[in-house]
Amino acid sequence: MTATENAPATAHSAAGESVIKLEYHQRLTNSDLAPLRKQSWTWYNIFAFWMSDIHSVGGYVFAGSLFALGIAAWQVLVALIIGIVAVNILCNLVAKPSQLAGVPYPVTTRVSFGVMGANIPAILRGLIAVAWYGIQTYLASVAFGLLAIKFWPSLAKYDVVDDYGFLGLSILGWGGFILMWILQAIVFWNGMETIRKFIDFCGPAVYVVMVILAGYLIAKAGWSNVSLDLSVGPGKVGWDSVTATIGAIALVVSYFSGPMLNFGDFSRYGKTFGEVKKGNFWGLPVNFLFFSLLVVCTVSAGVTVIGKDENGAIITDPVHIVDRIDNTTA
């Protein structure tokens, strides 16, 4: 056999260019699982990944809801700090083996679960991803329905589930959901490099829109009407406040459990482990705390400017906040 014939093979997939050596077992190797030929992500790419993850509608509603648990604002802040620091530490632990070897999460689990046993956590995380993808797609698709009704009011009748709907979603809702699904699929099918470019742009771009929204609402409401404490009803005291704070910490960790578990799929692209850790620091503790404060200012000012919902509850969904602003451009 010549030296050329003995050289590792190069494979291309949506995950990128990988190296498949001759000694790799054929049943345990493919272009998605093999080590990457080139790891090029910097700390900013990791930072932008977390920005894009946290900035989802789900993240917005989640952050706002923490401030309505009936505990003091300082307790919520403590819960946020402890929870997100724990997430940061766990993400670094998950990231290291994938970054060092250039392989995704399903491969690193072979160390703990065995070659065949690793299929179990890999399938479980896939099932969780399916559900989470559906939740996020639905939350984002609501905007399409609201936009359609805003510009074409006659479509409002198709947003009534009882008259035009099935499986709990109206015809208009299904239209928005399918459109959102297709738009995401277009990005995904173009591979990880396209996803990287997309999140590099969208991470900071969403912040620009969020700051504009917060600034608009604060200017309308006035600083005197902005509070960092969104607690409703009688506040929890004593042991109840302690358990609620611990619950808030657990909520922060559990909210990030999905991307945290799968983070090896992204950390494998990091140039060095140091770059990954730096991106995690700026993307998790720093970014999440700033994001949470921005959410609270927006929601708090929104109560004054647009009021509460039909049930008298604070509106934490940014899509519905914008929908209530009497400004078509907004």
Image (cartoon, rainbow, N blue to C red):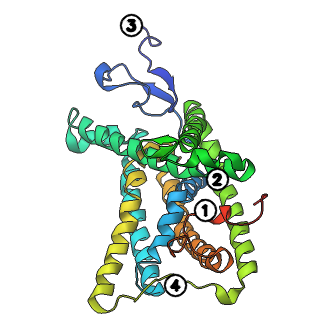
Report the front residue among 197 and 185. Answer: 185
Say which residue appears at 50% left-offset and 72% top-offset. Answer: 311
User: Mark 3 highlights which residue?
Assistant: 1
Q: Answer yes or no: do the residues labelled 1 and 3 have beta carbons within 8 Å?
A: no
Say which residue appears at 66% left-offset and 73% top-offset. Answer: 306
Measured Cα–Cα span from mark 3 to mark 2: 65 Å
Say whether residue 12 is visible.
yes
Q: Earlier in the sequence, mark 4 or mark 2?
A: 2
Q: Answer yes or no: do the residues labelled 4 and 1 have beta carbons within 8 Å?
A: no
Measured Cα–Cα span from mark 2 to mark 1: 8 Å
Measured Cα–Cα span from mark 4 to mark 2: 29 Å
> Dot 4: few (<14), some (14–19), or many (≥20) neighbours within 10 Å?
some
Q: Quadrant of the C terminus?
A: bottom right
Say whether residue 201 is visible.
no
Amino acid found under the numbered disc labelled 1: His
Q: Quadrant of residue 33?
A: top left
Amino acid found under the numbered disc labelled 3: Met
Measured Cα–Cα span from mark 4 to mark 3: 72 Å
Q: Earlier in the sequence, mark 4 or mark 1?
A: 4
User: Mark 1 highlights which residue?
Assistant: 320
Amino acid found under the numbered disc labelled 4: Asp
The label number, if any, that marks residue 146 in the structure image: 2
Q: Report the mark closest to the observer, 4 or 1.
A: 1
Q: Position of residue 58 (x, y in %)?
A: 50, 58
Measured Cα–Cα span from mark 4 to mark 1: 21 Å
Q: Report the mark closest to the observer, 3 or 2.
A: 2
Q: Position of residue 72 (x, y in %)?
A: 44, 87
Q: Earlier in the sequence, mark 2 or mark 1?
A: 2
